[in-house]
Image (cartoon, rainbow, N blue to C red):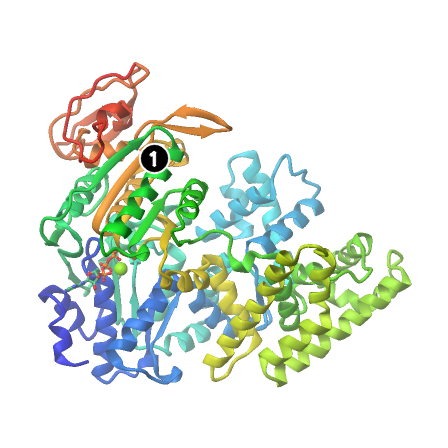
């Protein structure tokens, strides 16, 4: 790295970047250049002679990893794929470790990674086997509890001692079986990737030492969102050399529901006593007008490290709060505003982001953007990889790599139809359960099963031979050529034509999806020195989860971005619209009902605001349809807080009671105030919407006294 690069940093950033060794914590607010510090520090370590592959950087999403790779490429120049730092998400790091070591835990190294729909089919099967009707426990609920336990590091043996409700007890009983099915299918789910890695390190010192010895430096971005398991993995890898640099912002911790503990970042020095702590206080992203709003809001959180966050960009346009009669009007006006800006200014579609709390909110905006002919991308919607055709083809590929993969086998055994009907497949599964073996192992013996007709048995044997032939072929030949031949032999195109005889569009779109998958395979093969089907499937399993491959491609297109607040973390946009700013949505009703999770919702709101560089608009409809009926909404309490229209129990003068629109006193406990006395105040949400903003809406509301809406 040239010295001129250091000039692109402020003194505090420079101090962090120039710290060559030992533990380092960068604790700083949004947009202060934390990610920039990570990338520059990697470049600097390389310029000081550290070999790039000896550096590991962990980021939270594939998108962030890709961006970091790009930024580092710019700093250190293009290099061979064996000569770059390892930049990955926690999950892909664990996949790589497990591919080398998982045999020590009794799984084959060819294990497959289940996504949510595979998990769903296992959950259904388990519930069927233990005869639990789905009315008492839905597959979705079972998976939710399993995932909650796993993200807290609780295994199947211990789950029942943590169960409280009836559903939890049922789920705990199914957990062991679920895990057993996964293991016989040589499969792991997403949570297992982390848990098994942790378990491996705890039980196999040799594996831990070998994996730790691969790196001399470890850097972690978005550290506030690591959970206990992730932390222990990092600790295992870094404890010998102690060159661990973590950067994060406790105010942006938004994955508490996935077991992340913001305390990790605040307690960093307990484990790493000699750690140097660097604070960054200058925000380079947003104008002062936007940043002061964010600062005002986040001060309402009870537990936080007070930080100074100054805008490096003074002034700026005042953020707007707008209210609309209905959610359709909200969408219409927001899109009209974007359209005007594109026509009247130099703004391009990809300068705009519309951020929302829940996926269901997008429909109105999509409809409007379409009718205005403005290109847009929906990030996190139905993924390419969720399409039926793509899932079918991937199941074939997975079966070639991991024949034990039962959902893959069940998916394609009779797709396209081969005369192996439901009864035959049930019999196959039954036999597999009886012998506790993978269903694949039963296939050669189906002639002995009474429920298999001789025709079905012939088909099954032919199918078995087809897969075996391609197991060999994929090991030898080019992936793309072999895949093309495989797809031809499966007869998938004919199947698409058969099922959509009169619909040419559907034929094209479905066959196009298959082709697109082969394109992705070709792209992957072209990039890799040692490509393999297994690694390709790994990359898809990881990307599919976050839908990042789509996302990456889409973000480069010149289109308005629609995404959730969660997905927006770490990103920035010149103009941001935060829509649906109402009680029940942000904060989400679940977080309000399920104990006290409003602080996490407030951080989410803070993340949204701090994505904006130049312009920010917050809006909500006065009514929203629920089950077809329009209902009144209440503006989000956060709007009152960020405009200074709510009392802050943690700073400022004593709170007083406000009346709700319905005339009832709604009191919420707000815990200890700074002065130490317990205070109560009402939620800002109780204020009537009409008083929050003036009718004209174009201007930012002033602090005003509120009156009842009647
Ligand atoms: P977040 O908390 O949202 O993840 P961050 O702290 O990681 O933000 P970055 O994304 O690294 O912040 O930086 C925010 C913006 O500020 C980027 O556009 C970055 O290029 C710019 N920036 C960072 N440091 C400087 C600097 N010293 N001079 C000029 N621009 C800077
Ligand atoms: Mg960042």
Q: Circle 1 sits in a helix, a strand or a loop, which is it?
A: loop
Q: Which residue is drawn at 22% across and 19% down?
A: 658
User: In the displayed structure, does residue 427 sit left or right of residue 181?
Assistant: right
Residue 235 in sight: no
Q: How crowded is mark 1: few (under 14 residues within 10 Å), some or many (20 or more)?
A: few
Q: Which residue is drawn at 20% across and 44% down?
A: 294
Q: Which residue is drawn at 67% across and 77% down?
A: 485
Of all residues, the one furthest to the front in this rendering is: 343
Residue 40 in sight: yes
In which quadrant is the C terminus drawn? Answer: top left
**Residue 302, image x and y in percent?**
23, 38
**Residue 467, image x and y in percent?**
71, 73
User: In the displayed structure, does residue 628 sit left or right of residue 22?
Assistant: right
**Residue 159, image x and y in percent?**
53, 46
- Where is residue 488, by image quadrant? bottom right
Pointer 1 residue = 596
646 relative to 451, above or below = above
In front of the other: 1 or 366: 366
Q: Quadrant of ligand 2?
A: bottom left
- Where is residue 34, by image quadrant? bottom left
Q: Is mark 1 within 8 Å of ligand 1?
A: no
274 relative to 84, above or below = above
Q: Residue at x 25, y 48 (%)?
A: 251
In which quadrant is the N terminus drawn? Answer: bottom left
In front of the other: 172 or 88: 88
Give the total number of marks visible in the rendering. Answer: 1
**Residue 170, image x and y in percent?**
60, 40
685 relative to 240, above or below = above
């Amino acid at each position: 790295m040239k010295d001129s690069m250091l000039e692109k940093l402020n003194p505090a950033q420079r101090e962090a970047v120039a710290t060559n060794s030992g533990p380092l914590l960068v604790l700083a607010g949004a947009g202060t250049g934390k990610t920039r510090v990570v990338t520059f520090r990697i470049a600097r370590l390389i310029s000081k002679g550290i070999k790039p592959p000896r550096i590991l950087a962990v980021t939270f999403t594939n998108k962030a990893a890709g961006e970091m790779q790009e930024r580092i490429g710019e700093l250190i120049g293009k290099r061979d794929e064996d000569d770059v730092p390892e930049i990955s998400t926690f999950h892909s790091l664990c996949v790589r470790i497990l591919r080398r070591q998982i045999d020590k835990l009794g799984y084959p190294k060819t294990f497959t990674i289940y996504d949510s729909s595979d998990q769903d089919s296992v959950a259904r099967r388990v519930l069927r086997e233990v005869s639990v009707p789905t009315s008492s426990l839905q597959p979705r609920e079972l998976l939710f509890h399993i995932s909650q336990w796993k993200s807290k590091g609780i295994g199947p043996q211990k789950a029942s001692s943590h169960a409280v409700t009836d559903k939890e007890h049922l789920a705990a009983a199914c957990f062991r079986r679920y895990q057993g099915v996964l293991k016989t299918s040589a499969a792991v789910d997403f949570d297992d990737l982390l848990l098994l890695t942790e378990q491996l390190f705890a039980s196999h010192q040799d594996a831990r030492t070998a994996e730790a010895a691969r790196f001399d430096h470890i850097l972690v971005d978005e550290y506030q969102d690591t959970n206990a398991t992730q932390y222990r993995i990092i600790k295992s890898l870094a404890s010998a050399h102690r060159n661990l640099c973590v950067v994060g912002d406790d105010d942006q911790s938004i994955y508490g529901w996935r077991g992340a503990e913001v305390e990790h970042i605040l307690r960093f020095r307990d484990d790493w006593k000699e750690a140097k702590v660097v604070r960054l206080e200058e925000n380079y992203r947003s104008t002062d007008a936007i940043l002061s709003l964010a600062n005002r809001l986040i001060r309402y959180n009870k537990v936080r490290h007070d930080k100074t966050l100054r805008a490096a960009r003074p002034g700026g346009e005042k953020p707007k709060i707008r209210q609309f009669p209905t959610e359709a009007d909200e969408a219409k006006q927001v899109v009209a505003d974007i359209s005007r800006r594109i026509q009247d200014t130099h703004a391009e579609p990809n300068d705009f982001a519309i951020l929302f709390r829940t996926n269901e909110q997008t429909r109105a905006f999509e409809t409007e953007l379409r009718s205005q002919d403005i290109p847009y991308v929906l990030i996190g919607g139905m993924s390419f990889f969720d399409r039926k055709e793509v899932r079918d083809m991937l199941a074939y590929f997975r079966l070639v790599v991991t024949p034990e993969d039962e959902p893959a086998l069940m998916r394609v055994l009779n797709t396209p139809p081969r005369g192996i009907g439901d009864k035959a497949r049930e019999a196959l599964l039954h036999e597999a359960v009886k012998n506790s073996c993978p269903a694949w192992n039963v296939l050669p013996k189906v002639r002995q099963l009474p429920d298999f007709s001789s025709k079905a048995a012939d088909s099954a044997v032919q199918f078995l031979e087809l897969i075996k032939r391609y197991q060999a072929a994929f090991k030898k030949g080019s992936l793309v050529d072999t895949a093309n031949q495989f797809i031809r032999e499966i007869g998938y195109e004919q199947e698409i034509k058969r099922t959509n005889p009169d619909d040419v569009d559907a034929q094209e779109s479905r066959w196009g999806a298959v082709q697109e998958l082969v394109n992705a395979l070709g792209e992957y093969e072209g990039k890799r020195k040692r490509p393999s089907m297994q690694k390709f499937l790994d990359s898809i399993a990881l990307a599919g989860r976050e839908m990042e491959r789509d996302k990456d491609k889409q973000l480069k297109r010149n289109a308005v971005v629609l995404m959730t607040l969660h997905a927006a973390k770490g990103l920035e946009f010149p103009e941001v619209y935060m829509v649906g700013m109402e009680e029940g949505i942000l904060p989400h009703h679940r977080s309000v009902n399920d104990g006290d999770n409003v602080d996490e919702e407030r951080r989410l709101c803070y993340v949204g605001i701090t994505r904006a560089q130049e312009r920010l608009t917050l809006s909500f409809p006065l009514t929203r349809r629920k089950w077809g009926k329009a209902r009144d909404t209440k503006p989000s309490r956060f709007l009152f807080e960020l405009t200074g229209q709510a009392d802050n129990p943690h700073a400022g003068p004593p709170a007083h009671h406000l009346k709700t629109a319905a005339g009832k006193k709604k009191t919420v406990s707000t815990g200890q105030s700074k002065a130490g006395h317990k205070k109560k105040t009402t939620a800002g949400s109780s204020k009537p919407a009409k008083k929050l903003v003036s009718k004209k809406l174009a201007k930012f509301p002033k602090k005003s006294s509120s009156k009842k809406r009647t």
